[in-house]
Image (spheres, grey):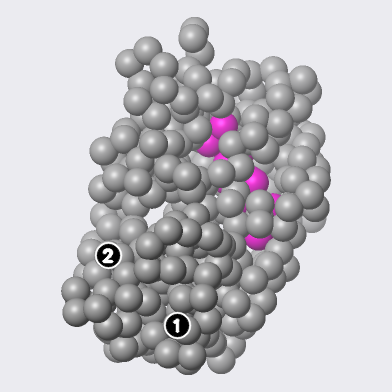
Amino acid sequence: MAVSISFVMVFSVLVFAPVCFCHYLYPQFYEYTCPQAQEIVQSVVAKAVAREARMAASLLRLHFHDCFVKGCDGSILLDSSGTIISEKGALPNKNSARGFEVIDEIKSELEKACPQTISCADILALAARDSTVLAGGPSWEVPLGRRDSTGASLSGSNNNIPAPNNTLPTIITKFKLKGLDLVDLVALSGSHTIGLARCTVFRQRLYNQSGNGQPDPTLDQSYAAQLRSGCPRSGGDNNLFPLDFITPTKFDNYYFKNIIESKGLLSSDQILFTKSEETMKLVKQYAENNDLFIEQFAKSMVKMGNISPLTGPRGEIRKNCRRINGY
């Protein structure tokens, strides 16, 4: 009954106050213009993850890297063209961000069903949710109605996205600038319960911490020895390692349990436990209570998805996620 009432309310607002309501994101945004949209996204994502389990983490990461640059506007999907310099070449994305072909496939199917209706930014938000669910994580209602940017920001990608070697104060600041607090930071870091990382992003923890040639003392040394076998002092930059070596394809709280045992793969993972009593407390809570982590992750994903969206007359609905309309 409550759901039916909410649909009626949404319809009433759309009819009588379209100018006011169009500036808000809400789950039923496409209820009347493309009711099959979410089903189409879910179907394509499911096929992609079935082909390659890693794709769940890749699609989740795309949404994160999009939202931290100019807001959740699909800018990360743009290729270089005309006056646009693609964010794909930024340090956090180069040879790392992936899943663009899956987004292309989703967009193609949506254009067949509902031409120029669903934004690429909303596709990223939905694909992130569906990927999380397919990995065994939580579901949540995705507020919709984002529009696509007509530009990209290479400098924004290089400077705004939290990096594996950032200090905790730097990471906290980057989250705070996006309206996200410590709870969001720790919960969203939990997305590292799935996915892989390249040798090059954590090598300094194995060989040259603080420039003294010694391994990071906050890294369990038996775990470090295992990592060194596949991540040599030089070469093998793109060799891949699971962010959570216990359950690398399952969305659960082992990421936090690993950190407590000094087995966080990235420096940005481990410092959540070693550099702040507040973040340490949250790590312990999520390690002890998977349900608490799952619940907070969903809340923080909705919050992150609301970072500076383009709505109303701003932006556009791209026909092709890789380029702005007219190119």
Q: Earlier in the sequence, mark 1 or mark 2?
A: 2
Which of these two is toward me, 226 or 119? 226
Which of these two is toward me, 239 or 262? 239
What residue sits right under mark 2 in the picture?
A: 166
Quadrant where the N terminus sits is bottom right
- Please state the horizontal and vertical placement of residue 73, each as a whole percent of the image: 45, 35
Dot 1 amino acid type: Ala
Q: Is residue 278 above or below residue 176?
A: below
What residue sits right under mark 1 in the picture?
A: 224
Q: Residue at x 37, y 77 (%)?
A: 206
- Please state the horizontal and vertical placement of residue 224, each as a whole percent of the image: 45, 83
Dot 2 amino acid type: Asn
- Please state the horizontal and vertical placement of residue 120, each as a whole percent of the image: 57, 32
Whether residue 276 sits left or right of residue 190 in the image: it is left
Residue 142 appears in view? no
Based on the picture, tell me whether residue 152 belongs to the magenta stretch. Answer: no
Mark 2: which secondary structure? loop
Q: Residue at x 42, y 43 (%)?
A: 94
The quarter holding residue 205 reads: bottom left
Whether residue 319 sits left or right of residue 81 in the image: it is right
Q: Main secondary structure of the magenta part?
A: helix
Label 1 vs label 2, nearer the camera:
1
Which of these two is toward me, 51 or 10? 51
Residue 325 appears in view? yes
Q: Is residue 271 above or below residue 115?
A: below
Q: Residue at x 33, y 16 (%)?
A: 83
Based on the picture, tell me whether residue 132 belongs to the magenta stretch. Answer: yes
Whether residue 110 sits left or right of residue 100 in the image: it is right
Q: Which mark is residue 160?
A: none
Bounds of the magenta segment: 120-133
